[in-house]
Structure formats: C-alpha cells, structure tokens
Image (cartoon, rainbow, N blue to C red):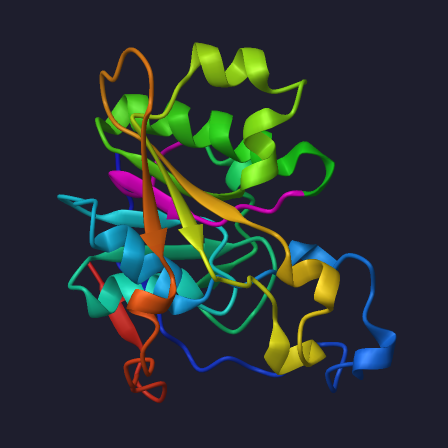
Amino acid sequence: MMHSCIIIGATPRSPRSGLPPTPRSIPRRIPNEFYPTPPEATRALLSVERFDGSIWEPACGEGAIANVLVDAGHKVVATDLVEYGFGISGIDFLKELRPRAKHIVTNPPYGSGLADAFAEKALGFAAETGGSVAMLLNMASLSHRRRTAWWKAKPPARLYAIDDIVCWPSHRYGPAPEYFTKHRYIWAVWTPNHRGPSAFWWLSGAEFRAAQSSHNNNKKRRIT
C-alpha cells in the first residue's frame, strides 16, 4: 500500500548548527553524508529513463533531485532521516516497512555501507511495486572487491557514466576540495524482471547544465 499526500518543496531552513562553516573547517566527510546532486545529473537521467508513476526520493536532503523530478511532471514523495527543511524528515528509509511510491530515485548516503543497505532495501520495495530503482553511485563501487558478487547477482538493467558533475554542498562549505572534484559517478538503474548483463552508456553533465528552473519556495506542493 502506497502513502500519498506528502508535502515537498518547503522553504529550506538554516542548519541547526547555525552558519555554514568556513572552507578551512571542512570535515573529511560531510555530516550526515550530505552530498547534494547537481540538477544536471537528474536531468541527464530523465533524458534516457522513463518513470511511469510516483517516485520516492528517500534521501531528499534539500530537494536537489526531487525538485528536478517535480519540474519534469513527476509525483514525488520526498523523505529524509535528517531535517533539511524539505519534504518529510525523521523517516529512516532502512526501517520503513512499506513502499511510499512505485519507483525510487536517489543519491544514497555512502558511508559505513549505507549505499549497499539502501540498494537492498530499494530493490525489495521495487519487487513489491513493480517499479524501477535509480541510484547515483560513486563509480568506484563498481569495482570494489567486496561488491563484485553482489553486482553479478543483482545486475542493473543499465549503467550510465555521467561526467563533469560534483556532488558537493558548496552553499554550505564553499568550493569542493580538489580531491573531491576527482570523484566520478554512475546512475545504476534496476528495472523489473531484468536478467543478464547490464547495458552501459555515457551521459554528459555539461549538456544538461543550465540555469536551474525557478521554484516557488513560498508555496508548499502537495503531491497525491
């Protein structure tokens, strides 16, 4: 049973910790694994994939992915464990018992095996709904020795390498450190009943990098 009437698009509030830290105080890992997805990454995904039905973004942050999906005409359920002033906070995706939408599109947290756990949970929900799962992942995860068997057992239908994107909260921490700009990403897309090897293709971030569509942040959007 799917939930509905989830509010997204609320005006982001200031972080609880107060003002963003200066670049000199950038931690090695951002608290709560907050690495927002640039809009061009989601636009690129939508140029090659179709989602017929509602979409759940379970690590919505400040709405980086959800806003692009809504702009494209999708009904989106946006949740997060942490309060970012967007969507429904306090929702632990890994403890959810029922899917909140047909499809799942997200950039999951990576640290401490969280991305692996998110993938397993999302695929379980998709098996119930008959939906697809699309996850933005670090390309290094494809060749990690501890994940090889898992990838072979649960291969995505399609893998898209996307160039020239940086998942970094520059509005909070300033420009990304040089080492971080060297990270490379892929969209992994699982579809119902897929069997066999994954198809592979390339996407250009620059091709979809344009001025972000304006949002009416003073008006909450109710998705049903």
Camera-side residue: 48 or 82?
48
Q: Residue shown at 27%/73% (left/top)?
A: 221
Q: Position of residue 44 (x, y in %)?
A: 29, 57
Q: Position of residue 169 (x, y in %)?
A: 61, 71
Give, as a single range, the part of the protein colored magenta: 98-110
**Main SS of the magenta segment?**
loop
Q: Is residue 24 left or right of residue 215?
A: right
Q: Is residue 182 left or right of residue 11?
A: right
Q: Is 50 inside the magenta-drawn segment?
A: no
Q: Position of residue 219 (x, y in %)?
A: 30, 85
Q: In which quarter of the view is residue 34 placed?
A: bottom right
Q: Vertical placement of 214 versus 76: above or below?
A: below
Q: Do we see residue 218 in this rendering?
A: yes
User: For the C terminus, which image quadrant?
Assistant: bottom left
Q: In which quarter of the view is residue 5 placed?
A: bottom left
Q: Residue shown at 54%/29% (left/top)?
A: 142
Camera-side residue: 213 or 223?
213
Camera-side residue: 189 or 79?
189
Q: Is residue 213 left or right of residue 32?
A: left
